[in-house]
C-alpha cells in the first residue's frame, strides 16, 4: 500500500452475497486490493477497507457495483470485476447491472445474449435506433455476435422477412485455390464463424429449415452484386477486407424495410499492403449522414478470455509506437531535404 494518510470505511454487504462478491479463494478481493492499492478485511460479517481517501472512494464504488450485480441474481465473474474496476475509474454513471438487464435473445441452451460492457450497450442501442450501423473494434468485442442476435430476434418477431449474412472472401495469408473441393467448399471456411453463431443462437435445425426456404442466407460478398435487398436484416462482417468499390456496391444494394450492420476491425486487414479498405473510406465518406450510426469498441469491450484483452491492448500500444516512429522518420527526411 502506498504511503499516505490511511483511512478506513465499512462496506455493507449482506452475508448471503459475501461469497459471490469475494470470489473463490477471495480472488475478486485480491484483484481489487492490487488494482486500487487498498486492504480489505472481513471479520465477523463486517467488511472494512483501508487505504487513502481517494482509493477508498473508488473501492466503495466498486463494492456498490458488485453488490447491485449480485442482488440482480448474477454470478460475479473475473471479467465482471475487471470491467467494474475499469468503469469505476472513469466515473461512469451506468451500472453494469443495468447493462446486463438488456437481454437481446436466448441461445438454444437458454443462455441469455446481452451486452456486457458500456461500449456493447451503446452499440446495441445504436442498432435499435439507426437503419445502418458500423461496428468497429478489435477481436472479441462481440461486434458480429450481438448483431447476429439482434438479426435473429428481429426475424423471429417478423420485423424482417429474411436474414442475409455476408463476408468478403479474402484470404488471411492463404490461397483459395489451394483449398480442396468445389467453390462452396472453398468458401465455407470464410463463412464458418457466421454459421457457428447462427447454430448457437438459432439452433441447427431451425437454421437449416429457414435456409432451405431462402429466409436465411450466408454468402460471400460477391454474391450481393446486382441485387436489391428489401425487408432484410443484412450483416456485412469483416468489412475491413472490402475494397472501396466492393463497399460501395454493398451499400447501394440496400432496399426498403432493411436494417444493415457492418462490422470490422481496422487493425486486422488482409488486403494488399497500402490498399485502402472500403470500411476505412466509408467511415470518412458517410460520417455526416444522419441515419447512419457508428459504434467504436475498444479493448475494454473485449469479452473473451481476459488474456485476449491484454493481447489487444499490447498490440494497440505497439502499433501506436510504430506509427509514431514512421511519422518521425518522414518528418526527419522532410527536414533534411530543406
Image (cartoon, rainbow, N blue to C red):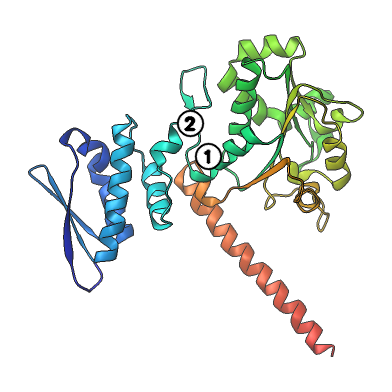
Query: What percent of the width, then of the height, locates residue 151?
Result: 65, 25
The answer to whether residue 117 is left or right of residue 336 is left
| Residue ID for mark 2 | 102
Q: CA distance from mark 1 to mark 2?
A: 8 Å
Q: Residues within 10 Å of mark 2 (few under 14, many from 20)?
A: some
Image quadrant in which you'd find residue 89: bottom left
Find numbered disc 1 in the image and state the secondary structure of the residue it sits on. helix
Instruction: Using the rendered image of the protein, determine whether residue 37 is visible from the camera's viewpoint.
Output: no
Residue at 20 percent across and 39 percent down: it is 18
Q: Name the residue furthest left.
A: 44
Residue at 49 percent across and 53 percent down: it is 310
204, above or below 293, in the image: above
Which corner quadrant of the image does residue 132 belong to? top right
Considering only order in the chain, which callout, 2 or 1, is on the residue closer to the N terminus?
A: 2
Q: Quick one: which residue is furthest to the front in this view?
A: 290
Q: How far across and how far down the image is residue 318, in percent?
A: 59, 64
Q: Residue at x 62, y 10 (%)?
A: 205
Front residue of 310/13: it is: 13
169 up-or-down from 288: above or below: above
Can you say which quadrant of the picture contains the C terminus? bottom right
Amino acid at each position: 500500500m502506498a504511503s499516505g494518510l490511511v483511512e478506513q470505511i465499512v462496506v455493507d454487504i449482506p452475508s448471503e452475497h459475501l461469497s459471490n462478491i469475494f470470489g473463490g479463494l477471495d480472488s475478486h478481493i485480491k484483484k481489487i486490493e492490487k488494482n486500487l492499492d487498498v486492504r480489505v478485511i472481513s471479520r465477523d460479517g463486517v467488511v472494512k477497507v483501508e487505504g487513502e481517501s481517494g482509493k477508498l472512494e473508488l473501492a466503495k464504488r466498486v463494492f456498490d457495483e458488485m453488490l447491485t450485480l449480485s442482488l440482480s441474481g448474477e454470478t460475479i465473474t473475473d471479467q465482471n470485476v475487471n470491467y467494474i474496476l475499469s468503469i469505476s475509474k472513469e466515473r461512469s454513471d451506468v451500472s453494469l447491472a443495468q447493462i446486463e438487464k438488456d437481454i437481446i435473445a436466448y441461445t438454444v441452451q437458454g443462455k441469455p445474449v446481452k451486452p456486457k460492457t458500456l461500449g456493447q450497450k451503446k452499440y446495441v442501442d445504436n442498432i435499435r435506433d439507426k437503419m445502418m450501423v458500423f461496428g468497429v473494434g478489435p477481436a472479441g468485442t462481440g461486434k458480429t455476435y450481438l448483431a447476429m442476435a439482434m438479426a435473429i430476434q428481429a426475424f423471429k418477431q417478423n420485423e424482417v422477412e429474411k436474414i442475409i449474412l455476408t463476408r468478403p472472401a479474402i484470404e488471411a495469408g492463404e490461397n483459395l485455390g489451394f483449398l480442396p473441393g468445389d467453390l462452396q467448399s472453398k468458401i465455407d471456411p470464410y463463412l464458418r464463424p457466421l454459421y457457428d453463431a447462427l447454430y448457437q443462437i438459432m439452433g441447427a435445425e431451425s437454421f437449416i429449415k429457414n435456409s432451405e426456404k431462402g429466409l436465411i442466407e450466408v454468402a460471400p460478398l460477391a454474391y450481393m452484386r446486382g441485387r436489391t435487398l428489401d425487408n432484410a436484416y443484412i450483416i456485412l462482417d469483416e468489412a475491413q477486407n472490402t475494397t472501396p468499390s466492393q463497399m460501395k456496391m454493398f451499400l447501394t444494394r440496400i432496399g426498403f424495410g432493411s436494417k444493415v450492420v457492418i462490422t470490422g476491425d481496422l487493425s486486422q486487414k488482409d488486403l494488399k499492403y497500402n490498399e485502402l479498405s472500403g470500411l476505412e473510406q466509408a467511415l470518412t465518406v458517410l460520417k455526416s449522414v444522419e441515419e447512419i450510426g457508428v459504434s467504436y469498441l475498444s479493448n475494454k469491450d473485449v469479452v473473451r478470455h481476459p488474456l485476449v484483452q491484454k493481447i489487444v491492448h499490447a498490440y494497440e500500444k505497439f502499433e501506436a509506437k510504430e506509427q509514431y516512429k514512421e511519422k518521425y522518420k518522414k518528418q526527419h527526411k522532410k527536414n533534411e531535404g530543406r
